[in-house]
């Protein structure tokens, strides 16, 4: 099983300032088809998770361009260029390269 | 617009079988890559339970594999989850999710299932 580790687990941020979350996998997420199936999801309080980013850096439909993803192999980053109030919640990375699909522990983003 | 909605009992007794259904609207259940289930114990993180591929192949979390069955009913545009021999540790919000164009791109609102006598 691929273990996903997120850093930090909690991130107080200032509105309008950037934020960054790191995700590391215990083994490479490069699939045999050449793609890297690393996603980022946001779970706002009281809501189901919502897909933000897939295959490292592709924004899902309707996701603002202040969200960006980067990385390769085993190290990945989600960046928010300027945090807005609606960005508060728990962010999860998830790998779907290999079964069982696994999630990171989650990073709670809150406003200072 | 794709929508998923979970349904099923909110309370299940220990040792019994948890049964949930996910009804899909706005998309044919026959034309997705995967349909799956994910759960979240109260106050905790997300756990992938399993997924069913368009071919009918199923993939389960090894930690639950002996107790889980996921199936599709194309006539009703639904897929379902059965989890047998439940204990209090299975108390969680259960989500259904699709993989149409990207992994877990659409989610249901979730349904809380409590295991208690």
Image (tube, coloured by chain):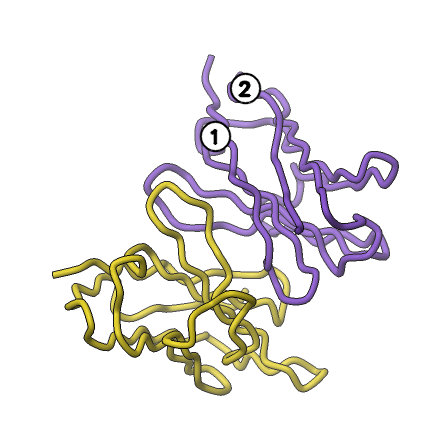
Chain colours: A yellow, B purple
Question: Which residue is rendered at x = 57% and y = 49% of the image?
Answer: B107
Quarter of the image with the C terminus of chain A is bottom left
Which of A101 and B35 lies nearest the eye of the viewer?
B35
Give the crowd class for mark 1: few <14, some 14-19, many >=20 residues within 10 Å.
many
The image shows residue B28 at horizontal and vertical percentages of: 80, 49
Q: Secondary structure at mark 1?
A: strand
Can I make out residue A3 in this image?
no
Please tell me whether residue A84 is drawn above or below residue B57 in the rendered image: below
Quarter of the image with the N terminus of chain A is bottom right
In the image, taking residue B14 as reference, residue B88 lies left or right, namely: left
Can I make out residue B8 in this image?
yes
The image shows residue A9 at horizontal and vertical percentages of: 26, 62
Front label number (2 vs 1): 1
Residue A93: image quadrant is: bottom left
Which of B64 and B101 lies nearest the eye of the viewer?
B101
Question: Which residue is rendered at x = 82% and y = 34% of the image?
Answer: B76
The residues tagged by marks 2 and 1 sit, at their Cα atoms, a distance apart of 11 Å
> Of callouts 2 and 1, which one flags the residue occurring earlier in the amino acid sequence?
2
Residue B72: image quadrant is: top right
The residue furthest top is: B117
Please tell me whether residue B60 is drawn above or below residue A102 in the rendered image: above
Which of A89 and B45 lies nearest the eye of the viewer?
A89
Q: Which mark is residue B112?
A: 1
Question: Which residue is rendered at x = 37% and y = 41% of the image?
Answer: A46
Q: Secondary structure at mark 2?
A: strand
Q: Which mark is residue B82?
A: none
Give the crowd class for mark 2: few <14, some 14-19, many >=20 residues within 10 Å.
many
Q: Which mark is residue B12?
A: 2
């Amino acid at each position: 099983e691929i273990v996903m580790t997120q850093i930090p687990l909690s991130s107080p941020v200032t509105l309008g300032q950037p934020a960054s979350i790191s995700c590391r996998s215990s083994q490479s997420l490069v699939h045999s088809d050449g793609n890297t199936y690393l996603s980022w999801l946001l779970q706002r309080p009281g809501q189901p998770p919502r897909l933000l980013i897939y295959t490292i850096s592709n924004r899902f439909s309707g996701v603002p361009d202040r969200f960006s993803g980067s990385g390769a192999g085993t190290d990945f980053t989600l960046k928010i260029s300027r945090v807005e109030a609606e960005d508060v919640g728990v962010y999860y990375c998830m790998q779907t390269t290999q079964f069982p699909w696994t999630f990171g522990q989650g990073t709670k983003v809150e406003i200072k | 617009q794709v929508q998923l909605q979970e349904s099923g009992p909110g309370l299940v007794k220990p040792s019994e079988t948890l049964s949930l259904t996910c009804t899909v609207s706005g998309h044919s259940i026959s034309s997705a890559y995967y349909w799956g289930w994910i759960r979240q114990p109260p106050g905790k993180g997300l756990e992938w339970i399993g997924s069913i591929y368009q071919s009918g192949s199923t993939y389960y979390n090894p930690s639950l594999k002996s107790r889980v069955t996921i199936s599709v009913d194309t006539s009703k545009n639904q897929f379902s989850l059965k989890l047998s021999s439940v204990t209090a540790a299975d108390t969680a919000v259960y989500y259904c999710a699709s993989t149409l164009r990207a992994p877990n791109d659409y989610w249901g609102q979730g349904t809380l299932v409590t295991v208690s006598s």
